[in-house]
Amino acid sequence: MSLPLPDYTSREFKNLSLPGASLEHKTFTSCLFFKCSLREASLLNCTFEDCTFRHCDLSLAVLKGSFFKETRFEDSQLIGVNWMDTSLEKKKFVIAKPVDFLKCVLNHSTFMGLSLRNAALTRCICHEVSFEDADLTRADCTFTDFTGSRFLHTNLTGADFTGAEGYAISPSLNTLKKTKFSLPEAMSLLHGLDIILTDPQQTE
């Protein structure tokens, strides 16, 4: 199946296979992508508004110039995606969030300097993902594995890391205000502080 038209509204794309394809200046509004393969595809200057990707593969996709608004990825693979090429630029005021991720694999992707305010990264696998200088204010990061991911000068105000694991977040190098963490994983926050932990039972 090809996509010859420039605009698509309320369409369902099932089992669409376009690995390595090049799509330019396409607009998708309220569309559902189900079990679609866009692996290594170039989605250049495309618009996705109120769309859902379910059980899809967009690994290594190039999203240069593409715009996302209220778009949701569920049970999908988005490995090695450079989101810096998209519309997720860092803004102080965001009326509508661009993306949500639920049960997705986002390994080796980068969100450096971008806005994920109010976004969901829930029950995802985020190994070696770059969040440096990103804005995750009030982001839902619950039950996600952040092993090897990088947080530096990241705004985590009001973000929820309940049930999350594998993260290494320095309180002195990131903004933590009313950020939610759960034990025992939250003990890793102490590693970034210049303190010495002792066991009182061993000093008696």
Image (cartoon, rainbow, N blue to C red):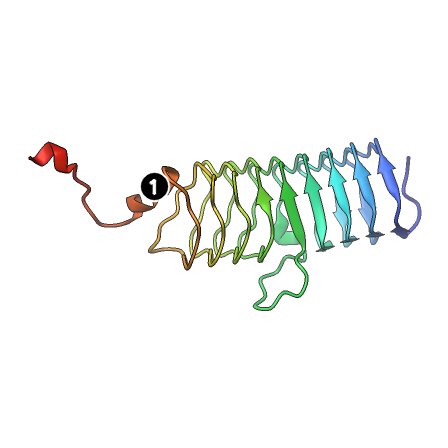
Say if residue 45 shows up in the picture.
Answer: yes
Q: Is residue 155 above or below residue 40?
A: below
Q: Position of residue 189 (x, y in %)?
A: 34, 46
- Quadrant of the image for the C terminus? top left
Q: Is residue 21 in view from this perspective?
A: no
Residue drawn at (38%, 38%) of the image = 185
- The location of residue 40, given as percent across then percent down, is 72, 36
The local secondary structure at tag 1 comes to helix
Q: Residue at x 29, y 43 (%)?
A: 191
Residue at the extreme left: 204
Does residue 29 appear to the left or right of 84 in the view shown?
Answer: right
Identify the residue under disc 1. Answer: 188
| Residue 174 lies in quadrant | bottom left
Q: Residue at x 89, y 51 (%)?
A: 9
Between 109 and 159, the one lying in front of the other is 159
Instruction: Count residues near mark 1 (Cα–Cα under 10 Å), then give few for <14, some for 14-19, many for 20+.
Output: some
Residue 140 x/y as whole percent: 55, 49
Image quadrant holding the N terminus, namely top right
Q: Left or right of 127: which side holds 73? A: right
Kindly identify the amino acid type of the residue bearing the numbered disc 1: Ser
Label count reads 1
Which residue is rendered at x = 33% and y = 56% of the image?
Answer: 172
Q: Nearer the viewer, residue 5 or 182?
A: 182
The image quadrant of residue 47 is: bottom right
